[in-house]
Amino acid sequence: MKPKASVNRPPTPDVVENVPEREPTLQELINIKLIETGEKERLMELLRERLVDCGWKDEMETLCRAVVKKKGRNNVTVDELVHVITPKGRVSIPDSVKAELLQRIRTFLVSAAL
Amino acid sequence: MSVPNEENLSSHSQLSSHFFLDLLDSIIVDVASECHRVARLGLDSNLEEEDEELKLSAQARVRVADPSNSNEANGKYVVDIFGQTHPPVANEIFDCMNCGRSIMAGRFAPHLEKCMGKGRKARLKVTRSSTAAQNRYSRGSPSPGSTYSPYSNYSTNSMNRLANGTSTFAGEEHSNGTLES
């Protein structure tokens, strides 16, 4: 039997040494910290619960339904819905919910800074 | 010392509001995508029907609250849910099964209250209770009838004995046995 020739791999190229590493910003660092500790998920769930309780989500769904009726269910896109409801959604957040979430985020920042 | 604290506080406030807006935008995108999915798949037909029912119920509530409608209801005839008109007081006439008078259906309950001596006003009327007492006294009169039944039993027994006496010879033996005991 004729022996198989081994596959000759090309040599691995050298790592380019001139790429400067970008220093991450404080926001990015804290965001990574939030994700790693699981606090972001907890905050997300808490915010979702609070918004459902106070009826904010129902208002948003009503707005979305109105937009769908206006444009037709086959002509509407997610981007259009997001574009329409984002300003109204930001404005109509109840102050109590916003204060609670901001307090929790601030507490996390203080503990992370320590 | 105080200056870095103030800077930290302000930066913390800015950072916290920034993160809050990020979370809020995520939730807004979630809601929008959910509504878009429902709309594209046609899952909201039931919701539309519910909306229509809500509108109809709101209209009905407004119509009930309208004084002009209530005036119509207070009028001469009442319209029921089937659209039929009825007089405010039932005017069908029939005979009372207790005293035999002819009474209108709408006034039958107060009539019964007086006729039978029962109900809310019966306590105030002594005449009805005296009438009931008279009825009870008259019910006592059949008591002689109760004494009649043992007499009939006695006569039945004597007839049985006569029949035994007129029977055959064997029957006489039985009668003799009875006399001996």
Image (tube, rainbow, N blue to C red):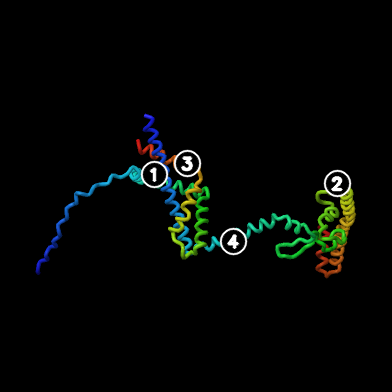
Q: Position of residue B5 (x, y in %)?
A: 38, 33
Name above or below for residue A98 compared with residue B50.
above
Three-letter code for the amino acid on which mark 3 is drawn: Ala
Q: Which mark is residue A99?
A: 3
Do tag 1 and tag 3 residues touch (Cβ < 8 Å)?
A: no
The span from disc 2 to disc 4 (Cα, nearest Å) is 56 Å
Secondary structure at numbered mark 2 = helix
Subunit that carries the residue with mark 1: A
Q: Quadrant of residue B13?
A: top left
Q: Position of residue A107 (x, y in %)?
A: 41, 38
Secondary structure at numbered mark 4 = helix
Q: Which class describes the residues within 10 Å of circle 4: few (<14), some (14-19), or many (20+)?
A: few
Q: Which class describes the residues within 10 Å of circle 1: few (<14), some (14-19), or many (20+)?
A: some
Q: Of discs 2 and 3, which sits in the foreground?
A: 3
Report how many numbered discs are placed on residues in the image.
4
- The answer, for residue A36, to whether it is visible in the render is no
Q: Earlier in the sequence, mark 2 or mark 4?
A: 4
Do tag 3 and tag 4 residues touch (Cβ < 8 Å)?
A: no
The span from disc 1 to disc 4 (Cα, nearest Å) is 43 Å
Q: Which class describes the residues within 10 Å of circle 2: few (<14), some (14-19), or many (20+)?
A: few
Residue linked to disc 2: B124
The span from disc 3 to disc 4 (Cα, nearest Å) is 37 Å
Residues marked 3 and 4, same chain: no
In front: B121, or A41? A41
Q: Which mark is residue B52?
A: 4
Subunit that carries the residue with mark 3: A
Residue linked to disc 1: A39
